[in-house]
Amino acid sequence: MSSPYRIAVAKLRRDLPASTEVAFSAPFDAEKIFDPKGEAETDVSWDAPIDLQVKIESYSGGLRVKGSLSAPWRGTCRRCSKTIDGISHISLNERFVDPEDLTEDFYPIDQDFIDLAPMVHDAVFLDLPLAPLCSPDCKGLCPYCGIDRNEASCECQGETDPRWATLDSLRFDNEEPAPGAE
């Protein structure tokens, strides 16, 4: 079975300059190279459909791949711990070169083929949010009773740290004293 990420580029390399457009949808990790992350981490499922649209252009030093991709992800809200789904929309602009010219900044051309999968994996993993929010105004969980403040309210008040208690009596002009402060 041939991977849709593997693209023949012999004709592009022979006819300089030349270009071709490639568009497809394929599973993120059909070979299951990456282990699933934990429940609290943002991740992309191995079978998540990646929509890729790129233009491959040849030049005398190799190939340039420009375009975009979209990838669905799942994570946990950093404030309320709800599972959330999102979609990353990523712009691509990468170079592929012959193995003898390869550095960590480029991807390899392998016998007149390029494999877009490593580029896609790198782009998606770098774009995943580290601490996603279910909404910008998420109120999170109460640190004392654990109630979701987006769905209900509570009357919890934390204990005052005695090291900071002196600051309760600090007042500025036109300010009323805090309850319990002298």
Image: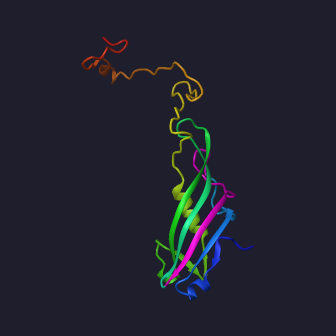
- Residue displayed at 54% across by 78% down: 57
The residue shown at (61%, 81%) is: 9
In reply to whether residue 55 is colored magenta, the answer given is: yes
Q: Please identify the residue farthest to the bottom as the structure is shown.
A: 14
User: Which quadrant of the view contains residue 122?
Assistant: bottom right
Report the label total.
Answer: 0
User: Farthest residue in the left direction?
Assistant: 173
Residue located 70% across and 58% down the image: 47
Mark yes or no: residue 111 visible: no
Q: Which residue is at 56% across, 75% downward?
A: 56
Q: Is residue 25 left or right of residue 131?
A: right
Which image quadrant is residue 26 in?
bottom right
Q: Which residues are magenta?
A: 37-59
Q: Tell me residue 4's x, y (percent).
A: 68, 71
Q: Quadrant of the C terminus?
A: top left
In front here: 178 or 8? 8
145 in relation to 79, above or below: above
Q: Is residue 81 above or below residue 118?
A: above
Q: Is residue 181 above or below residue 82?
A: above
- Give residue 70's position: percent from left, percent from top: 60, 58
Q: Is residue 166 magenta?
A: no
For residue 30, side relative to residue 175 (left or right):
right
